[in-house]
Amino acid sequence: MEPKCKLKKQDGEPFVDATEYRRIIGSLRYLVNTRPDLAYSVGVVSRYMDTPTVTHMSAVKQILRASSI
């Protein structure tokens, strides 16, 4: 995640598919067992699993990009 990234529960942006968001977060939480450097970022984005927005999904995509390195 970006160092100054501020995520909010309700930020007025459109929502994304919560089921897809939860599936990706679950996969990332499994990956954290082998990549502890991602633990903080995954913990932050997993707080917003009930109502994810476009901003939350973009943060998840950044984590996915970082995990592929």
Image: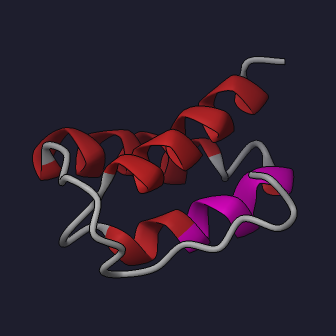
Is 52 placed left or right of 39 in the picture? Answer: left
Residue at 84 percent across and 18 percent down: it is 69
Q: Is residue 39 above or below residue 63?
A: below
Colour pattern of the rendering: secondary structure
Residue, far top:
69
Mark count: 0
Query: Majority secondary structure of the magenta segment?
Result: helix
Looking at the image, residue 68 lies above or below residue 44: above
Picture coordinates of residue 56, whole percent (x, y): 44, 55
Question: As drawn, is 7 to the left or to the right of 3?
Answer: left
Which quadrant holds residue 31?
Answer: top right
**22 horizontally vs 34: left or right:** left
Residue in view at x 74 percent, y 52 percent: 1
Q: Position of residue 4 (x, y in %)?
A: 82, 67
Q: Which residue is at the front of the view, 37 or 4?
A: 4
Give percent across and percent down for residue 50.
Answer: 19, 72
Q: Residue at position x 66%, y 51% from top? A: 32
Q: Is residue 44 above or below residue 33?
A: below
Q: Residue at x 36, y 74 (%)?
A: 11
Q: Which residues are magenta?
A: 37-44
Q: Is residue 43 left or right of residue 51?
A: right
User: Was residue 46 drawn as part of the magenta stretch in this picture?
Assistant: no
Which of the two residues, 21 or 16, is positioned nearer the viewer here?
16
Task: Provide residue 39's location: percent of width, then percent of height.
Answer: 72, 62
